[in-house]
Image (tube, grey):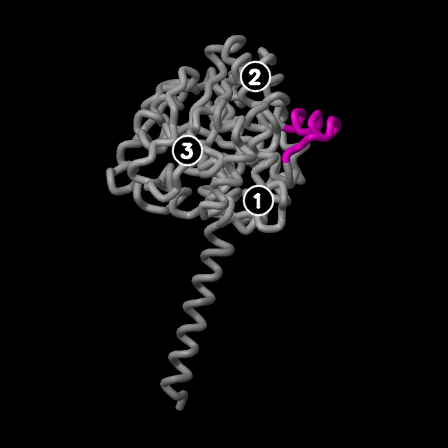
Amino acid sequence: MVQRSTKFTGICIAIYLVYALFVFVALPMLLPDPVAMTRTMLIQQTRHLGNLSNYTLETGGCPIRSMLVTFRGSGAISLLDHLTRQPGCYHHYSPLISYKNRITDKVKIERALDELVSLYTCDYNHSMSMLTSGMKTPTFKNFYGTQWNTCVAYSSDECWSPDTMSKICKIFPFINMSVYNLGLKYLSVLLMRKDLNLRMLLLVRDPRGTMASRAHRPWCANNPECFQPNDLCTNMATDYMIAEKLLQDYPDRFGIIRYEDLAMNPLQGLKAVFDFYGLPMKHAEEKFKPKGLLKKNKILYFERPMEWMDELMPQEVRYIQHVCAEAMQLWGYRPVSVFAKVKSDTFVPLKKLPLFVK
């Protein structure tokens, strides 16, 4: 007679085989292709917005295009979480991720700009290096396009296929992008392109907060450009000069917001950002309960704006303030002078400036 344990093992193996056949053979045959699946979900999610065919590339329309320009460690992740998850939004997260540092070489700058323009038309022919680099980064995989959702039901090869991604991108009415490592003076040329009709927002953060945020990031540890404030603050000062002119030249299509203003008033700040971009905003209130601002989950909630006061040593703050004196003055950040009396709940390092999105 067959022993009971042997029977049990046989039953378990049989169940596993049936499950494997269903998941890896039958289920893929029953599922529609990822483009059809995404289209069905998109129609459901955006039905309250009416007919959007005038805004999709697939139907010959012109999408609403937007760009967020910022620096690594700027606290943009919480804002991008909302942009990525809003109905109808397709997000090109960090499309220049394959360029490890900020791009300064003229040839590379031109190549990068061509790549960004191509992505705004859902063309991935110039972006294989982006996909290769991005696949190694969990944050990229979580925020790029609809891959965070598509890859749940389909294989990685299928959901990250350039052809599949291009077709999915073309059915979305709102195409946005976040760029970290290309300067505003180069990106500003995209505002001149009438075919893109792009709206661009510059997100700036107190360099003390940026450097404190970078201190905990593995990708920053071996990169002097990243963990030293010199490059950051030089670029922040340059961006200020360029931003002033862009506000005059493109008042309806270029804007600025400080991370601290956004994080301290998330509902009003998010509404201002979405209104500026011309995007519908839904369900933001559900994510921002009062206690949520104190949590450190950087995917769902904003980091505390003045957290650097608790994380940086006095000598670190002094050094950043010395190196970044010009940038801090331009962007309205007050320096700490008497460290013994500074507390994160009483010191207010922000000056009110007239430039910012409200």
As shown in the figure, which amino acid type bears the numbered disc 1? Phe
Instruction: Provide the residue designation for mark 3.
Output: 79
Q: Are marks 1 and 2 in contact (CB under 8 Å)?
A: no
Is residue 110 within the magenta segment? Answer: yes
Residue at the extreme top of the image, as rendered: 249
Cα separation, mark 2 vs mark 3, equals 23 Å
Residue at the extreme right of the image, as rendered: 107
Q: Given this view, does label 2 or label 3 mark the residue nearer the observer?
A: 3
Examine the image and state in which quarter residue 60 appears.
top right
Q: Given this view, does label 1 or label 2 mark the residue nearer the observer?
A: 1
What residue is rendered at 24% in x and 38% in y? 290
Relative to 154, residue 231 above or below: above
Residue placed most toward the observer, 298 or 67: 298
Residue 347 position in % (x across, y down): 33, 35
Instruction: Provide the residue designation for mark 1.
Output: 227
Quadrant (top left, top right, bottom left, bottom right) of the C terminus: top left
Instruction: Provide the residue designation for mark 2.
Output: 196
Cα separation, mark 3 vs mark 1, equals 23 Å
Is residue 64 within the magenta segment? Answer: no
Predominant secondary structure, magenta span: helix
